[in-house]
Image (cartoon, coloured by chain):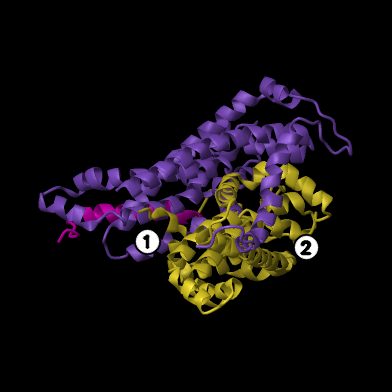
Chain colours: A purple, B yellow
Amino acid sequence: MKTGRDPFPYLLLVPAVLLVGLIAAWPIIETFRLSFTDASMRPTQEYVGMENYTKFFNRDFWPVITRTLVWTTLSVSLKLILGLLGAVLLNAAVPGRALFRVLIMPPWVVPIAVGCFMWAWLYNGQFGMISGLGQRIGLFSGPFEFLAYKQAAFIATVVTDVWIGTPLVALYLLAAMQTVPADLYEAAWTDGASRFYRFRRITLPLLMPSIATMALLSTIWTFNSFDIIWILTEGGPRGSTTTMIIDTYRTAISRFRYGEGAARAVMILICLSVLSAIYLAMLLRLTRKGRAR
Amino acid sequence: MINRYRWWEYLLIYAGMALFLVFMLAPFVEAFMVSLRPLNEVFRVPYRFIAEGMGFGNYVTIWTAQPMLLRWIMNSFGIAVAVTILSMFCSVPAAYAFARFEFRLRGSILAVFLVVSMVGAAVLIIPLYKLMLAAGLLNSYAAMIVPGAAFTVPVGIFLMRSYFMRIPAELEEAAYVDGASRLYTMRRVILPLAVPGMVVVAVTTFITAYAQQFLFALTFNSRNELNPLPVGLFQFFGHETVRWNEIMAASLVGVLPVLVLYVFLQRFIVAGLTAGAVKE
């Protein structure tokens, strides 16, 4: 509406730019700078070139990044599959769907930490529910401590992450599903198309952009996931759930190696910027397509 | 007619819903059952879903067994409220600027907010820690509130912006013609109209702030009386005997207010969460 050298819009932006700039934008730059130093608890720091990076690459870069990618991919795929299933169920015109919509959200509403406390108890080997019921039906021969074995802990953290993330995916896909024009379904129905056929040939293709958007957003969020793993396993047992974030936190905050930690954080930032670039390119393409139509 | 289901379709839908709900709610049900058990029934082999001597005793004794509990819950609430206020104070004017004005750095500033919203707080924990240390804010409420708010501002801006864009611009033009200043127009014409949107964003921000107060408190705070509930309870993990029944009772008491809030406001929350999903 107004153009030119008007100071008013800039004044409106001052609080947001100050807060976000100081707390989120500046730290991104500072992380890059710190990654080239030997910063630690000592008051002085020196530039050490690429040393932090070479150290990371020579030691545990590949296992950690592979583990992170597997963890993220597994979790995001499960969230999308369950979320799509949930959205389909939410979209079914049957009595009780309003109640169903209310009841699937609690995992997202309660604090992540509290959700993890509940799961930690479920995973308890000696007295927990899953191990107990598993023994009763003969699945396990004795107490099974889920968080004490490498693979089991890996799966257990994924399951908890899926539990927390699925409600939001389901709601988002439901909202997208409800924008599909009803006359499309009616036309197909008049032509005798079955419900499954209508889903496969109308709903799914029209939903694809939303599914792709959600897949990328979910990947970014899951990549950033810290609380769940830290509370359940702190990255253990024997490093089997140490994702890049957990690795960074442990190096920097638990061992006070800020420089080395920053180099690890930079690798995360690079991964995130690749993901964000894909996301933005997709968003631009979608809006352009929308306008062309 | 199109929505008429055959009996086996009903069966399939309800069975699917039931399975889905079992996964989503089983942890809550089991947490509630544990909170009712006396300690000797918690540590009992073999596992039994319904134990002997169940009752609400733990809900009475937790307040004396853990005198800090009320303080932690109040802290959680206080921090979440403060985060919401600070976040809204930043995001509402910024969103208005992005929705209504053309200015030179518009695109680049918006891009910075978008980039920032992709980076989780845990990635930036090192400079943040040094910042809090330098500012002398370690072990204070501010160390949990200020970063907590900063990371919710970008999403708040994007949501608020779409609300402002739905308000017809003619309203402002009419106000300008009548000689109203831009600040007056914003305060007296636009903000009152944006109240429903602001409620949605505030509620979503509050729930997010309540849900995510772990990392900053864990890293920046070591004074127990300032801890929010999640970190307060986290201290009891890894002890030799975890008193699960009390932890679950305390957890459920702590989440009950947000659950009630959610049930009452869920229409608004769902609208806010899915605002970005509808693309034309």
Relative to residue A17, is residue A153 drawn left or right? left
Relative to residue A53, is residue A287 drawn left or right? left
Is residue B22 located in the magenta-colored stretch of the structure?
yes
Whether residue A155 appears in this view of the structure is no
Whether residue A63 appears in this view of the structure is yes
- Which residues lie in the magenta part? B1-28
Which of the pair B275/A235 is nearer the observer? B275
User: Measured from the top left, where is residue B229 in percent x and y?
Assistant: 67, 60
Question: Most extreme residue toward the bottom, as rendered?
Answer: B178
Question: Most extreme residue toward the top, as rendered?
Answer: A58
Q: Give the amino acid type for the residue marked by disc 2 in the picture.
A: Glu
Q: Is residue B50 above or below residue B121?
A: below
User: Measured from the top left, where is residue B47 in percent x and y?
Assistant: 52, 50
Q: How many marks?
A: 2
The quarter of the picture where the N terminus of chain B appears is bottom left
- Overall secondary structure of the magenta section: helix
Chain that bears disc 2: B
Chain that bears disc 1: A
Relative to residue A67, is residue A84 drawn left or right? left
Q: Secondary structure at mark 2?
A: helix
Can you identify the residue that label 1 sits on? A100
Residue pictured at 40% horizontal, 41% vertical: A285
User: Measured from the top left, where is residue B238 in percent x and y?
Assistant: 70, 46
Q: Give the amino acid type for the residue marked by disc 1 in the picture.
A: Phe
Question: Most extreme residue toward the left, as rendered?
Answer: A191
Can you identify the residue that label 2 sits on? B225
Give neighbour class at mark 2: few <14, some 14-19, many 20+ (Cα, 10 Å). Answer: some
> Label 2, label 1: how many angstroms apart (C-alpha)?
39 Å
Q: Is residue A43 above or below residue B272?
A: above
Which of the pair A66/A1 is nearer the observer? A1
